[in-house]
Amino acid sequence: MGIKHQRIGSLIVKEISQMIQTEMDDPKVGFVTLLDCEVTNDYSYAKVYVTFLGSGNNAERLEALSNHAKYFRMELGRRIMIRKIPQIVFVIDETYEKGKRIDDIIKDFNK
């Protein structure tokens, strides 16, 4: 991924994060953190990696967040000036959970 794609990805994460904090009031989503965004070379799709804090069914929370993807895309079209606004696809980033499990295994092993 080139520097321009990384810059656009960072901008998408920043803008969607602001929209979630200030404009979205959906209790089904809960507390969500946007971690990263990968934009395809042709700017057709933007894969946004998210994590959810707290208890709850992450699949349902992801679905609730994905239901707002069209709104986010429309607002991105108003807020950022790029030729093509990508379709937003939200994906759960399980890196933190995997790292936590490995850390727990290491702690149990050292006991």
Image (tube, grey):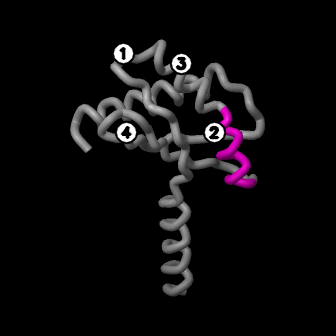
Q: How much space separates mark 4 and mark 2, taking CA atoms?
A: 17 Å
Residue 81 point in image, percent of width and height: 36, 15
Residue 92 point in image, percent of width and height: 56, 52
For the residue marked with disc 4, what is the amino acid? Val
Q: How much space separates mark 3 and mark 2, taking CA atoms?
A: 15 Å
On residue 32, which mark appears?
Answer: none
Q: How much space separates mark 3 and mark 4, taking CA atoms?
A: 17 Å
Question: Residue sitting at 52 percent across and 28 percent down?
Answer: 16
Using residue 84 as the reference point, say whether residue 93 is left or right of it.
right
Dot placed on the residue nearer the N-terminal end, 4 or 2: 4
For the residue marked with disc 1, what is the amino acid? Met
Secondary element type, mark 2:
helix
Dot placed on the residue nearer the N-terminal end, 3 or 1: 3
Asked whether disc 2 touches disc 1, contact meaning CB atoms under 8 Å apart, the reply is no
Mark 3 lies on residue = 75
Question: Residue sitting at 32 percent across and 35 percent down?
Answer: 42
Question: Residue sitting at 54 percent across and 20 percent down?
Answer: 74
Q: How much space separates mark 4 and mark 1, taking CA atoms?
A: 15 Å
Dot placed on the residue nearer the N-terminal end, 2 or 1: 2
Mark 1 lies on residue = 81
For the residue marked with disc 2, what is the amino acid? Ser
Range covered by the magenta-colored residues: 57-67
